[in-house]
Image (cartoon, coloured by chain):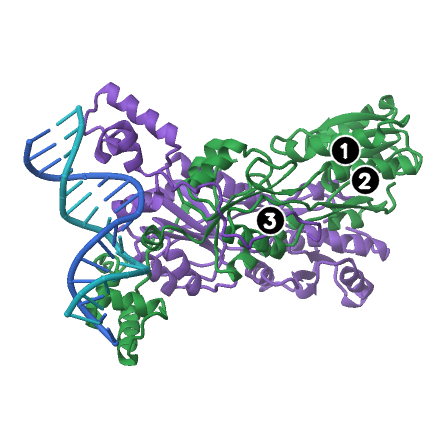
Chain colours: A green, B purple, C blue, D cyan
Amino acid sequence: MRHVMVQIPKTPAPASPAPRSVPTSADVARLAGVSRATVSYVLNNTSAVRISEPTRRRVHEAAKELGYVPHAAARSLRAGHSRLVLMPAPTIPVGRLYGQFINELQWALSRLDYTVVQHGSVGLHGDEAARAWAELRPVAVLVPGAGLGPKGVAVLKRSGARAVVTLGPESVEGAHALLMDHRAVGHSAARHLCGSGRRHIGVVVPEEPGLEAFSLPRLEGVRRALHGTHATMTPLPLAHTEEAAAQLAARWRELGLDAVFAYNDEYAMLLMRALQDQGIDVPGETAVIGADDLMLGRLLRPRLSTVHLELPSGRDLAELVDRAVRDPGAVPETHKVLGATVVHRESS
Amino acid sequence: MRHVMVQIPKTPAPASPAPRSVPTSADVARLAGVSRATVSYVLNNTSAVRISEPTRRRVHEAAKELGYVPHAAARSLRAGHSRLVLMPAPTIPVGRLYGQFINELQWALSRLDYTVVQHGSVGLHGDEAARAWAELRPVAVLVPGAGLGPKGVAVLKRSGARAVVTLGPESVEGAHALLMDHRAVGHSAARHLCGSGRRHIGVVVPEEPGLEAFSLPRLEGVRRALHGTHATMTPLPLAHTEEAAAQLAARWRELGLDAVFAYNDEYAMLLMRALQDQGIDVPGETAVIGADDLMLGRLLRPRLSTVHLELPSGRDLAELVDRAVRDPGAVPETHKVLGATVVHRESS
DNA sequence: TTGAAAGCGATACCAG
DNA sequence: CTGGTATCGCTTTCAA
């Protein structure tokens, strides 16, 4: 359904004031009756030079009067570096957990005097995106997920990035890595299900694109947990719609499964609902476990078992970035950062 | 991140692998045996000048060999303007709907050759943030929510922003406005409840900070819808926890309500669950309606009635931005963009 | 204590 | 067709 933007008629506005050109430090200097150098000294509190108090005041007043705002591009062009930390903007709907992590990270980095921007790289893939990021000459780049190759890392470093950090399934040559091994999620879930006697485990794999980076490793984790046991694993592709869930539930009994690990709590809820509507008892006939430990899981009946994830603290990551920026020559660090803990409730 | 980290001792001055300096267009010119001007012409496909094919090839090869990436800051410093569209990064967990909107917007803007960045402005309030944004000299700024005053708009415009667009409850002097009047949400919900004979309506107001910008207008919308009727309205502060919901449900009958509008579907679910656990029949004894039309509402029993919101299309907004950038002198446009439609299911 | 001037990287004008 | 060169806004020596 298309939505029309309704324009509201406005009373004729006062003729906008002549678009004065943007004030520069030279304008400030002129107004204050000093040189541009002095302006720079004053506004940056340069400690190497001492400026008389009256002069400082005049400069500050002139700056305020003109509404002067320094030009970041000119500044970093001159300085030869920026304090810009860049990360790609998430392209998939981002959960509460990850959103909170990003926020914490931004806060911690700004405490360290970095400017954080999320670059809207849509349609740009991998190393192609790296070029776009490199144009901004960020001092550090943080890349969640896979998609950035060694080549992309090289582009970024060659263009002056002093730290490249990946948050993903595996480490990339030349970059620091925060390993988030989602196999651990599937592994925990499968061990839990096995441990409570389940032998035929379905694994919901979302059909929505963009989620493979998480869903496939989670699936692989189940496979590994089951390796060497007599339990079986059945991948279950599922779109995030009621219809798809109903269809899957309709043929549930032919599948011969006694448990299902559902990628995350949302898919788990979708499927559990469909199963219940089919008259399939949860957890009696089929156990269900999700992941991400959303609030909603606690509200379902039966309460949904889940795998609780633990991300690194934004503060720690900020410190890693800062350390890497200060010592770009150091050997890239690699940390395992994804905690996965089963929260056993009623559905399994 | 309390895992063991591998790090080299930092005492020796980082005789790091010769940190070659970042290649510039001059390096490309040198390698290709041409002037910097020619490099610029070739790499930007300048149509005003015609460069011989062999020269073009040599330049491209040199650029590729050096891994040359143009310096955005230098470019826009010289050009006097950028193609940067800036928006603050959301500080509250952002819903699917809004996330999708942002994505669409970024895509549409990049089709129009803009670079979109979300600026991590944490702790910066209002006009203070505007200064930080202005340092990047964006060609356009998009600000969701309230918080940007006329003063902030002025700072941005004075620093060269050719378009400032707010998405919020009311328009701001000097800026284009996409009015999202959340009162319409509460209004629709209340009219629906009234229309089906309910007379004592509770309104859930989240206690979580940062949501007032939405929750208060929604509440106000209910008040207005009820004005002149004999129905009553009772605000119900509620934290997003099971305990809080249980406590509210425990004293439900003293409240004497026969309906509740729950800010959004998540709070609605939380409360509905608690009501049901108290043995209160929904919708028999109390009708429940949420907002945002989340998938989860369809999975509840009874299915949750909701207010479906419709945001403007990202494409439309992108076009508004582009129009405003091309004609900065134009009178700021004001559009009403929030569609609110009741989706009547089983809980009301 | 302040000012003059050299550049950072890229572009566009104007000669050659 | 191609090459010098001035310029964008700012910082930072070096002189005065």
Task: Tally the marks.
Answer: 3
Q: CA distance from mark 1 to mark 3?
A: 33 Å
Tell me the kind of residue under disc 1. Answer: Gly
Percent across and percent down for residue B306 are: 65, 47
Which quarter of the figure has residue C14?
top left
Q: Which is nearer the eye, A164 or B101?
A: A164
Q: Return the chain for callout 2.
A: A
Within 10 Å of the Cα at label 3, are there few (<14), some (14-19), or many (20+) other Cα atoms? few
Left or right, B197 with reference to A320: right
Give the x, y percent position of residue B206. 66, 61
Contact (Cβ within 8 Å) of mark 2 with mark 3: no
> Going 76% across and 67% down the picture, which residue do you hit?
B255
The secondary element bearing badge 1 is classed as helix
Residue B205 appears left or right of B72: right
Marks 1 and 3 in Cβ contact (< 8 Å): no
In this picture, is B18 found above or below D13? above
Q: Which residue is mark 1?
A: A221
- Are the residues under badges 1 and 2 in a single subunit? yes
Q: Nearer the viewer, mark 1 or mark 3?
A: 3
Query: Compared to B44, does B268 lie above or below?
Result: below
For the residues beneath circles 2 and 3, the answer to whether they share a chain is no
Residue type (three-letter) at the residue carrying disc 2: Ser
